[in-house]
Amino acid sequence: MKEKLEELYKKFESQVALMKNQAEVLNLKAEYLGKKGALTETLKSLKQATVEEKKVIGPLANDIKDKVQKQVSQKLAEIEKKEINQKLEKSKIDISFRDSMKDKGHFHGGLHPVTIIQQEIEDIFISMGFDVLDGPHIEDEFHNFEALNIPSDHPARDMQDTFWFHDDKTPDGKRHLLRTHTSSIQVRGMTSRKPPFRFIAPGKAFRCERTDASHEMVFHQLEGMMVGKDISVSNLIYFMKTLLREIFKKEVEVRLRPGFFPFVEPGFELDMKCLICGGKGCSVCKQTGWVEVLPCGMIHPNVLKAGKIDPDEYNGFAFGLGLDRLVMMKYGIEDIRHLHSGDLRFVSQFRGF
C-alpha cells in the first residue's frame, strides 16, 4: 500500500508539470482527489488494512493529499501569473520613449506657466528664510476685510468687486465671500505664530471685474509679510528687488510711488518697466510703459492688533504680487485671458521651462 501511494504521487508530479492551463490542472486534481479519484479510491482500501498498517499508511496518505493540494495551488498561481504577463506584454506602452510617442501624435504633460512661476518664487523666498502658507478660498468678512483695516463702508465691499454668498452668517454675524485677495492668509498667519516671522502666501483670488488684456475675474496672487523689530522700507525694497532680479535673471528697472491701501501705512505702488514693449507703451501697460506688480508698504498698526501683535513692540512690511502679470512679463504674453483659456495649444508652449 505504501509503495502504491508513493508511485501514485510520482505519477501526479510528472503529469502536473506538463499542465499548460487552469482547466487541465483542475481536471487532474479531480482525477486524484475527486470522489472517484485515484488517491481517494486508494484511501478507501485502508478499511481492509491492519491497525499497524493504518498507523503507517494513514499519515503518509494525508501527507500526499496535502502535497497534491499544494502543488495544484502553486500550478494554478503559476499559470495565472504567466497569462497576466502575456497580456501585459501585448498591451505594453513604452511611455519613456519620448520620440516614438511624438511620432504617434502623443505628447507628455507639462506645468501651467503660472505654476512654473509660483514654484520658482516659492523657492526664492524659501532660500531667504520665508515659510509658505495656504488658506481657504471661501472667507468671512473679518479675515478678508476687517482684520485688514478695511471698514464696512470701503468701496471694495461693493457688489461690483466682491462675490458674496447668500448663506447663513458666521456665529459672530459675518458674511461669507470668495476671497478678493490672498491677504486674508496674512491674518491667519499672524494669529498662528509669534514674531519674528516671515512668510508668503500664494493662491487664487476672485473679483467681479470686467475682463480685459490685464484683468480677470479669477486671478493669482502671492502675498508676503515680514514682522519683527526695527524693520524699515529699505528691507522691503531689498526683498522686492531681489525677487524680481531672480525671476527675470537680470536687473529690472522699478519705481516706487505713494499708494493708499488700508492695511499698510505708508503704502506704495512698486512698478516695473514693461518688458512687453520695453517701456514704449502697449495694451498691457495701458500705454504708460510701466506695469504695477507689487502693491506694498509698512503694516498698519490696526492690522498688527488684529493679528494679536503689539504694534509698539513690533513692525513689518507686507506686499501683494500679481502672479498672472508677472507671468506675462516673464514670457511676453500680451493678454491675461490666454492664461485662463484652457487652450492646450497655449499651455504646451511651456513644457520646456
Image: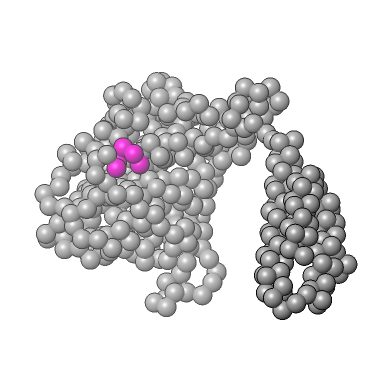
- Residue 191 percent across, percent down from the top left: 28, 64
Residue 291 placement, left or right of 268? right
The answer to which image quadrant residue 325 occupies is: top left
Colour scheme in the image?
Answer: one colour
At x 47%, y 38%, the residue is 114
Q: Is residue 326 visible?
A: yes
At x 73%, y 63%, the residue is 2
- Residue 312 percent across, percent down from the top left: 12, 60
* Segment tinted magenta in the rendering: 122-126
Q: How many marks?
A: 0
At x 77%, y 65%, the residue is 1
Residue 309 placement, left or right of 161? left
- Residue 145 percent across, percent down from the top left: 37, 61
Q: Is residue 315 visible?
A: no
Q: Nearer the viewer, residue 164 or 43?
A: 43
- Residue 102 percent across, percent down from the top left: 65, 24
Is 49 colored magenta in this rendering?
A: no
Q: Nearer the viewer, residue 6 or 260?
A: 6
Query: Relative to 315, does residue 351 appear above or below in the rendering?
Result: above
Q: Nearer the viewer, residue 111 or 320?
A: 111
Query: Relative to 186, does residue 85 appear above or below in the rendering?
Result: above
At x 43%, y 49%, the residue is 203
Q: Main secondary structure of the magenta part?
A: helix
